[in-house]
Amino acid sequence: MADDNTLTQESGTGEDSSVIKVLRQRVKELEKELQRRPDPETVEAEVARRVARREAATSVLVQMGFSPKMSDLVTREVEGDITEESVRSFLEGLGLKADSGQPTDDGAKQSEKASQVAEVADLASQVASVTQSDGTPDITKAISEAKSVEELDAIMRKAGLAG
């Protein structure tokens, strides 16, 4: 870029034109912004650190019998190193029992409950499709208010959706 004397002489008045002033100001702003940005090595190191944390969280979660999809939550919420102890503590803080991948009776019960919930969701979906076709929303309300699997089964039989 030309020095200041060349630019002021081009305008013929000894003063910078308003365009030149604006451009110089913008150059100063961009130079300051460039100085504030981290260097590529710093960015690369940070990305590598985050990837390593996510991989560690995924590994620990899978060992404990949890979905690897929870790794983003774990990496965001657990401070410091991702270890089995830190993940276990975090999960227990959420009310989840971390079992280190060892099946227990509680795990079987949780699995059975999860299976029942999935069954209920599937049945509710079937009922919703039926009620949309014949306009009987009372069945949907009854299903949503059911307090047990047996009660739900009775409602479904009454509606003709179960045998």
Image (tube, rainbow, N blue to C red):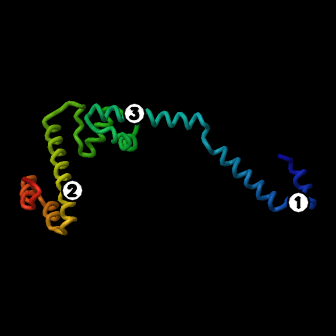
Tell me the kind of residue under disc 1.
Answer: Glu
- At 89% from the left and 55% from the top, the residue drawn is 8
Residue at the outermost bottom position: 135
Q: Which of 1 and 37 is in front in this view?
A: 1
Nearer to the camera, 143 or 102: 143
Q: Are marks 3 and 1 in contact (CB under 8 Å)?
A: no
Please say if the residues under marks 3 and 2 sit with CB atoms less than 8 Å apart: no
- Marks 2 and 1, the one that precedes in the sequence: 1
Which comes sooner in the sequence, label 3 or label 1?
1
Left or right of residue 54: residue 92: left
Residue 70 percent across, percent down from the top left: 33, 42
**Amino acid of disc 2:** Ser
Q: How many labels does the image show?
A: 3
SS for tag 2? Answer: helix
Q: Position of residue 3 (x, y in %)?
A: 86, 47
Question: Which residue bears the numbered disc 3?
Answer: 55
Q: Mark 1 points at which residue?
A: 15
Q: Mark 2 points at which residue?
A: 125
Q: Residues within 10 Å of mark 2 (few under 14, many from 20)?
A: few
Residue 147 in sight = no
Quarter assignment of residue 57: top left
